[in-house]
Image (tube, rainbow, N blue to C red):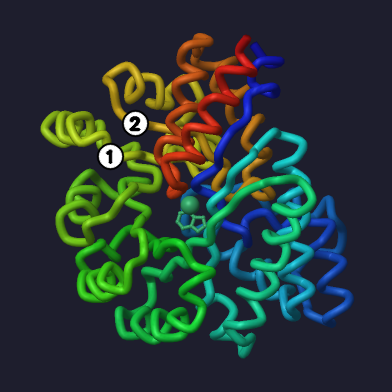
């Protein structure tokens, strides 16, 4: 089964590019850019990655992102992630970035997007990997701040597929961003939002009904409402689930308690993603392997999860068909 996991072409739909910053690159960039980081060795960094909840992770994640300064830094970050895609057979990826994390430190929006975009262009040219970019608003900041960020993004509309919502969930419900999501929709962006990661299922309802999202990121708390589960099933609203992340951030106490198999068996449109792989002990294949080993996923389960990743992506129907055929070929 592990061979099958490795062999299947996959799409990744929930990956924060800042969360793919490996300690080695963090150290290298800190030195180059003369940025202080609170670690003496790479081992120190890994020791610090011991989280109690989402906020305890975010504090360390935002501090790590401070080492990213130049366009080349964002290129290198993205290019390193692309190497993991090659290793794990990710053939299509839709990556998140958090511009406010960088613009608040005086880094220009264009520095960030141009670095990421040029690495993704090179990934397509060199490896045939297709991709999209999703710009996330930080939900702990104000809606006005999100509006300002959306205005900056308009100049890069051709490079940005979608708009998302991330950062500290509790106390920052989707309703706080209703108007800015409405404008983003009018501008033609696809919409996603983190909802029901730590906060309860009411945040998922808000993301669907008030923000009109196309996908829910995480969504594992949907299990708290039968009515919501029925709706997610009927409408096949995608949930981009991130198993390793949920374990590392203590959303579930153990892998055995993770509910992805229940969601899948119920008929929900779930897929597997790595979220912040440099912080959560592994990239997409490791997430699949952990699920297989702890939750006894069957071959059918794995194929369904993989096919869901393509079906839920923002690519056109022809490319979806192409990739779904590739999955079937790999199975033969
Ligand atoms: N930003 C990066 N990873 C995140 C997560 N798992 N939840 C919310 N915001 C994030
Ligand atoms: Zn996330």
Quadrant including the N terminus: top right
Asked if residue 195 lies left or right of residue 124, the reply is: left
- Contact, mark 1 vs mark 2 (Cβ under 8 Å): yes
Lower position in the chain sequence, tag 1 or tag 2: 1
Q: Residue 224 — which label?
A: none
Residue 305 in the image: above or below residue 19: above
Asked if residue 229 lies left or right of residue 56, the reply is: left
Of the pair 249 and 314, the residue shown nearer to us: 314
Image point (39%, 32%), residue name = 270
Q: Quadrant of residue 264?
A: top left
Quadrant including the C terminus: top right
Q: How many marks?
A: 2
Q: Can you give x and y, in whole percent of width and height, for residue 97 in the image?
A: 55, 65
Specify whether residue 287 is in view: yes
Specify whether residue 248 is in view: no
Which residue is identified by label 1? 237
Asked if residue 287 lies left or right of residue 125, the reply is: left
Q: Can you give x and y, in whole percent of width and height, for residue 211 in the image?
A: 22, 61
Of the pair 318 and 268, the residue shown nearer to us: 318
Q: Can you give x and y, in whole percent of width and height, for residue 114 in the image?
A: 66, 75
Image point (84%, 82%), residue name = 34
Which residue is identified by label 2? 269
Q: Residues within 10 Å of mark 1 (few under 14, many from 20)?
A: some
Outermost residue to the left = 227
Image point (34%, 37%), residue name = 220
Q: Residues within 10 Å of mark 2 (few under 14, many from 20)?
A: many
Q: Can you give x and y, in whole percent of width and height, for residue 290 in the image?
A: 60, 24
Q: Secondary structure at mark 2?
A: loop
For the residues labelled 1 and 2, the Cα–Cα distance comes to: 6 Å
């Amino acid at each position: 089964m592990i061979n099958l996991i490795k062999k299947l072409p996959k799409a990744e739909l929930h990956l924060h590019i800042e969360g793919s910053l490996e300690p080695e690159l963090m150290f290298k960039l800190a030195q180059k850019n003369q940025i202080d980081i609170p670690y003496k060795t790479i081992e120190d960094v890994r020791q610090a990655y011991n989280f109690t909840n989402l906020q305890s992770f975010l504090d360390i994640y935002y501090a790590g992102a401070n080492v990213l300064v130049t366009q080349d830094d964002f290129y290198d970050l993205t290019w390193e992630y692309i190497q993991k895609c090659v290793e794990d057979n990710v053939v299509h990826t839709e990556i998140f970035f958090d511009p406010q994390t960088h613009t608040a430190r005086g880094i220009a929006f264009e520095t960030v997007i141009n670095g990421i975009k040029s690495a993704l262009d090179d990934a397509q040219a060199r490896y045939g990997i297709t991709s999209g970019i999703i710009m996330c608003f930080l939900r702990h900041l104000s809606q006005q701040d999100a509006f300002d960020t959306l205005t900056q993004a308009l100049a890069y509309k051709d490079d940005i597929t979608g708009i998302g919502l991330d950062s500290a969930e509790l106390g920052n419900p989707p309703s706080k961003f209703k108007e800015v999501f409405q404008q983003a929709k009018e501008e033609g962006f696809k919409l996603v939002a983190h909802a029901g990661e730590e906060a309860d299922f009411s945040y998922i309802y808000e993301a669907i009904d008030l923000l009109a999202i196309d996908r829910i990121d995480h969504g594992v708390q949907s299990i708290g409402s039968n009515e919501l589960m029925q709706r997610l099933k009927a409408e096949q609203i995608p949930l981009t689930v991130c198993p390793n992340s949920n374990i590392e951030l203590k959303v579930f106490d153990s892998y055995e308690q993770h509910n992805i198999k229940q969601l899948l068996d119920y008929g929900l449109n779930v897929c597997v993603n790595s979220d912040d792989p440099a912080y959560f002990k592994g990239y997409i294949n490791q997430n699949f392997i952990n699920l297989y080993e702890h939750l006894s996923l069957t071959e059918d389960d794995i194929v369904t999860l993989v096919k869901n990743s393509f079906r839920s992506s923002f690519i056109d129907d022809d490319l979806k068909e192409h990739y779904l055929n590739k999955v079937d070929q790999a199975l033969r």
